[in-house]
Image: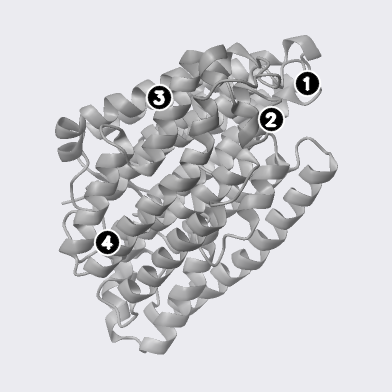
Amino acid sequence: MTEMNENPLVLLPELLLAASAVLGLLLGAWLPRRRQWLVGLLAAVAACAGLVAAAVAATRPDTTAFGDAFTVDPVTSTSRVVVLGGLLLVLALTAGPFHAHPRESELSVLLQLSALGTLVLAGAQDLLLLAAAYLLASIPAYALAGFRKDGPGTEAALKYYVTGALLGVLMLAGITLLYAAGRATGYPLLGPALPGAPDALVTAGAVGLLAGVLFKAGAVPAHFWVPDAVQGSSAPVAAFLTTLPKTGALAAALRLGEAVLADSGMPWAALLSVVAAASMTLGNLAAFFQDDVKRLLAYSAIGQVGYLLLPVTVAGRSDLAQEALLYYLAGYAVTNLGAFAVVCALPRATRVGDYRGLARRRPLLAASLVICLLGLVGTPPTAVFVGKLEAFSAAIDGGFGWLAVLAAVNTVASLFYYLRWIVPAVSRGGGDRLTDGARPARAVAHTAAAVSLGLGLAAGPVLPALSGSLSA
C-alpha cells in the first residue's frame, strides 16, 4: 500500500539538483573564466549527494508526494541512481574540452536542468507533471545540442527543437484527450476511468501522449533528430543526449502502461511492439555502413531503444517487465557512456578507420572500447547481456515470442557494425589521429567498462531489488 507523504524531502535528489543549478547560474555570473570549474564541481557534489539520498529513499516503503503527483518506488529509485550516476560521468567528460570555456558554467547548469527533468519524468504520476517534466528535460537539451554555436551544432539544435516542439504539441493534445476520456490527470484516478471511456478517444489520446515520450527515448518514428543532433553536438553532449533522457522516458512509458493504459481499450501492446520492432530494425540497418563514430553510436542508440521497449510492450502482462527494463537501462547507460568516453578521449579520431592501431598505442583504452562495444551487442558477462536476456524473457512471458525472436536476429546482425569498429582498433598500423584528449575521459572509459562487467556479474543480487509493484 502506497503511503501518502506531502514532505518535500521526498524529492530531495531533485531538490539538490535544482538548488545546485540555480546556485551555479548565479556563481557563473560572478566567477572569472578560469574559476568556472567550480560550478561543475558544485554539480558533481549535488549529484553525489542526490545518489546518497536516492539510496536511502530506496530502502524505505513506497511513498508519494503532492497529491499523488509524484511517486518514489523502485522505478523512480533506479532511475535516480542511473541518471545521477550518468550525470557524474558526463560532467567528468566535459571537464577537459570545456575547461575555461566562456560558457563553462552554463554547460553544467543545462546538464543539471535536463537531468532534473528526466528524474521528474521517471517519477511523474500525473499527466500535467509529465508534460512539465517533458519541457524541463527538453528545453535545456536543445541549448546543449547547439552549445558550440558552429554550423553543424546550430543545424542539430534546430532539427532537435523543431521535432521536439511538434511532438510536444501532440503530447499536450493527447493529454487533453485522455483528460476528456477519464476526467482526471492523476494516474490513480485516470487508470480505473479509462476502461469505460470510448476506445477511439483513449487510443487517440494515448498515441499523442506517446509521441512525446518516444521523442525523448529516440524511438521510431520520433527518431529523426538523433543522428544529426549527435553528430553536430560535442561528444560529451552527444553522450548525454543518447543516454540519460531515455531513462526517464522509458520509465514514464512503463508507468503509463502498467497504471493507466493496461486495462483500457487502447491496443497498448500491439502499438508498442510495432514501435519496438521498427526501432531495433531501422537503427541496426542504418548503422551498418556508418563511418563516423558518433553517427554510428547514434543509430546504435535507436536500435537499443527497440530492445528497451520489449519490457515496456508487455507492461501489465508480465511480472518480469519492470526488473528487465530497469536493469537494462542501468546496463545500457554505463556501457553507452563508456563508448562515448573513448570518443571523447580521442577527439581527432572521428572515423572508424582512425582507430587503427589503438590497441598498440593505448591498450587500456582499446580494451575499454572493446568491452563497451561488445557489451552493446549483448556479450556475456556484460550488464547489457543480462538486460537483453531479461527483456527477451519478459517478451516471451508476455506472449510476444515473435518480438523476442526478431530482437535476437537484430542482436546478431548488430555485431557486424560493432566489429567494423573493433577490428581496426585491435589491428596494427595507423595511429596518426590517436592523439590524447583529456585524462578524465580515459578515466570514465575505464570506469564504465569495469562497471559494465561488474554489474553483469552482480546480476543475481541486483535483479530482485528492482522488482516491486508500481505505485498507482
Do the residues bearing badges 4 and 1 touch, measured as CB atoms within 8 Å? no
- Which tag is nearer the camera, tag 2 or tag 4? 4
The quadrant the C terminus occupies is bottom left
Do the residues bearing badges 4 and 3 touch, measured as CB atoms within 8 Å? no
Q: How far is mark 4 from mark 3, CA to CA?
A: 27 Å
Q: What element carries label 1?
A: loop
Q: Looking at numbered disc 2 in the image, what kind of residue is underneath it?
A: Leu
- Which tag is nearer the camera, tag 3 or tag 2? 3
Q: Which mark is residue 107?
A: 2
Q: Looking at numbered disc 1 in the image, what kind of residue is underneath it?
A: His
Residue at 77 percent of width and 43 percent of height: 153
Residue at 40 percent of width and 72 percent of height: 274
Q: Residue 411, how many percent across, how many down?
A: 36, 51
Mark before the other along the chain sequence, 2 or 4: 2
Q: What element carries label 2?
A: helix
What residue sits right under mark 1 in the picture?
101
Frontmost residue, 154 versus 16: 154
- Which tag is nearer the camera, tag 4 or tag 1? 4
Q: Residue 74, how many percent across, how many down?
A: 26, 43
Q: Residue 446, how many percent across, how many down?
A: 45, 18
Frontmost residue, 356 versus 435: 356
Q: Residue 404 carries which label?
A: 4
Q: How far is mark 3 from mark 2, CA to CA?
A: 26 Å
Q: Residue 384, how many percent across, how many down?
A: 33, 40
Frontmost residue, 371 versus 102: 371
Do the residues bearing badges 2 and 1 touch, measured as CB atoms within 8 Å? yes
